[in-house]
Each structure stands twice: as C-alpha cells, then as structure tokens.
C-alpha cells in the first residue's frame, strides 16, 4: 500500500529530495515525524527499483495481495461437499467402517 500510494510523489530523477507536500503534511500534523517521512521515502524509492534489485518485502507483499484477491474471487466457486475415499486394510471378517458425510461451508 505504501509503495503504491507514495511512489509517484517523489521525483525519480532526484529521489533523495523530500517532496514539499510531505513536509507540509508534517507541519500540519505534529504526530508525523521526520523518521516516518524518511521511511515513506525509502519505500517509495524501493518501488522505483527494477524487480531484480527491489527489496524482497515488496515482492512478498505483491504476491500476498494477489493471493488474497484470488482467494476472494474464488471463495464461492468450490464444491460444497468434500468427497474422500478411504482405503483401510482390516482383518478378515471385520466390518468396514462407514463414515458420515459432512457439508463444508465457505465463510
């Protein structure tokens, strides 16, 4: 989220310069510290890097977000019952167990 929301605030030609909007935001809100602004700047600079050089955290975050979106899209697509086949080796003359079928609900 931080990489996407703040990346285009910095100038890729001069990424070490803190944007004036961030400094104004810091002046308006005393709870924002210079350390938070520097962290925001590091994340934005990392987002400008090529994928081969970017921090692994950005790649992991992108994969997690993609997985969450895919899971949400597919949550109503799966089967409502789970069918299992069980093979058991039992003694001669022993009655095979019968297992109840259970309906699985997606939440």
Image (tube, rainbow, N blue to C red):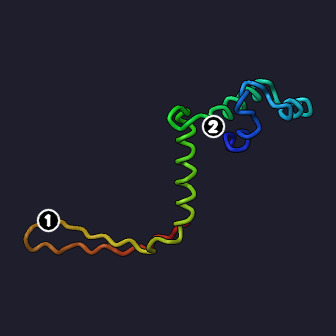
State whether residue 76 is above or below residue 62.
below
Position of the C terminus, as image quadrant, is bottom right
Picture residue at 19% right of the left edge, 73% below the top: 96
- Report the side of 100 relative to 107 (left or right): left
Q: Residue farthest to the left? A: 92
Measured from the top left, where is residue 75 in percent x and y? 53, 66
Decide: marks 1, 2 in contact (CB < 8 A)? no
Picture residue at 92% right of the left edge, 33% below the top: 28
Residue 31 seen: no
Measured from the top left, where is residue 8 in percent x and y? 73, 40
State whether residue 101 is above or below residue 57.
below
Residue placed most toward the observer, 37 or 101: 37
Position of the N terminus, as image quadrant, is top right
Which secondary structure lies at badge 1? loop
Q: Which mark is residue 47?
A: 2
Q: Quadrant of residue 97?
A: bottom left
State whether residue 101 is above or below residue 6.
below
Measured from the top left, where is residue 54 in percent x and y? 55, 33
Which secondary structure lies at badge 2? helix
Q: Which mark is residue 10?
A: none
Residue 56 seen: yes
Residue placed most toward the observer, 31 or 53: 53
> 10 Å neighbourhood of mark 1: few (<14), some, or many (≥20)?
few
Residue on which the image places disc 1:
89
Q: Earlier in the sequence, mark 1 or mark 2?
A: 2
Residue placed most toward the observer, 86 or 20: 20
Measured from the top left, where is residue 77 in percent x and y? 49, 72
- Report the side of 96 relative to 61 (left or right): left
């Amino acid at each position: 989220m931080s990489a996407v929301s703040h990346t285009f605030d910095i100038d890729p030609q001069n990424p070490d310069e803190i944007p004036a909007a961030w400094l104004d935001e810091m002046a308006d809100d005393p709870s924002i510290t210079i350390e938070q602004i520097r962290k925001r700047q590091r994340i934005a600079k990392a987002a400008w890097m090529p994928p081969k050089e970017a921090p692994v955290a950005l790649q992991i975050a992108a994969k997690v977000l993609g997985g969450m979106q895919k899971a949400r899209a597919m949550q109503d697509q799966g089967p409502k019952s789970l069918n299992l086949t069980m093979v058991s080796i039992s003694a001669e003359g022993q009655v095979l167990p019968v297992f109840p079928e259970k309906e699985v609900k997606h939440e």
